Image (cartoon, grey):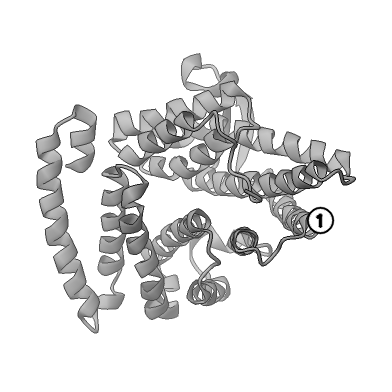
Amino acid sequence: MAAMSNIVDAPHVVVRAREKYCLALKETNKALRHPIQVTADSTLTAVLLLGLFETIAFDGWKNYHIWATHIQGATALLQLRGTHQFTHELGIQLYLLFRNRLIQACIQQGIRVPSALTEVNSNFERNRVVGPYNSIQPVSLASIGFRIVDLCADIKSHVLTDSRTICHFALDIKANLKAWADLRSETFFEISTAREAANIYFEDKKHVYSSVWGAQLWNSWRSLGILINQIILDSLDHLLLHNQEIEHDVYSEALYSLRNLSQDVCISTPNLASSPRAPTMIWPLYIVLQEARNVETVRSWAATQLQGIKTYMGIKQAAVLAADTWRESLTPHFNIFA
């Protein structure tokens, strides 16, 4: 109902949706207090849907704490659910959805990965027994993501202040990301020339993935790659600002990599835009859009796709992020040393 109200501009519908949301929240809180229901898949699904409602009804960062509360509360639930959640497909899917959102929430808030989530993820790595998830070994993309989250948090809190040290850590993480991709570059996708309507493809290119899950996985990798290259470039810019020597080939490669990854996110958009996983594109597209080092055509495409997610799926957060980023486009991009 909330999504439909955003699509057809019917404010009275969102009022009814908010009423139903309050009822659902009340029932979910009951389940959370129940000794058996608290660990049920249905309860975690309810928490996920409550968070999705906040994403759909998102009006701005003034409401971010509500969305973040749902995500943070999921960490305790994941820990309570124990290793049994990793023995069936739905349990794994729910965990992966929340893990990705928790990583995003930690980056947005500038905090380290909660120790509880680190513990749960370690159990997941040891207990994967279903579907394609076994193929993720031996390098875990999630563990790399955790390192990036913690590095961003340590920079923001000034635990790390030396630019060369930061760059060194970032380059090490970047090498891990490359190792992950090298093991899977032929497993999930290939690039081809689009033969369909050109206006739905970025630069008339498209990716061919083995599955929608594969498309989402690669965009998670690209998002992490963009973030780590941002850190490298910001640390090197900081050194240049203070008239210190840098390795210019490292700078050039990081800039090339950042832009290439951003273009790949744009190319991948049609693979997910018409699927139930379309909301997973919001974070990668936002990262691409807010990066001022990207060329205007890339940022404009990302903004248009975010607006499209709101227009066709009713997810308001996508349009709000696009509008806010363009509004601030005359100001410096996110910088770890700001």
The quarter of the picture where residue 42 lies is bottom left
The quarter of the picture where residue 144 lies is bottom right
Which residue is outermost to the bottom? Answer: 35
Q: Residue at x 11, y 60 (%)?
A: 23
Q: Residue at x 34, y 63 (%)?
A: 69
Q: Is residue 120 left or right of residue 261?
A: left
User: Does residue 9 sit above or below 76 in this rendering?
Assistant: above
The total of numbered circles placed on residues is 1
Q: Position of residue 128 (x, y in %)?
A: 53, 70
Quarter of the picture containing the N terminus is top left
Secondary structure of the residue carrying tag 1 is helix
| Foreground of the two, 209 or 72 | 72
Q: Position of residue 141 (x, y in %)?
A: 61, 58
Q: Residue at x 49, y 48 (%)?
A: 213
Q: Is residue 295 left or right of residue 327?
A: right
Residue receiving disc 1: 164
Can the viewer see residue 205 in this picture? no
Q: Position of residue 88 (x, y in %)?
A: 40, 68
User: Does residue 28 sit above or below 63 in this rendering?
Assistant: below
Q: Is residue 100 left or right of residue 193?
A: left
The 10 Å Cα crowd at callout 1, few under 14, some 14 to 19, many 20 or more, is some
Amino acid type indicated by mark 1 = Arg
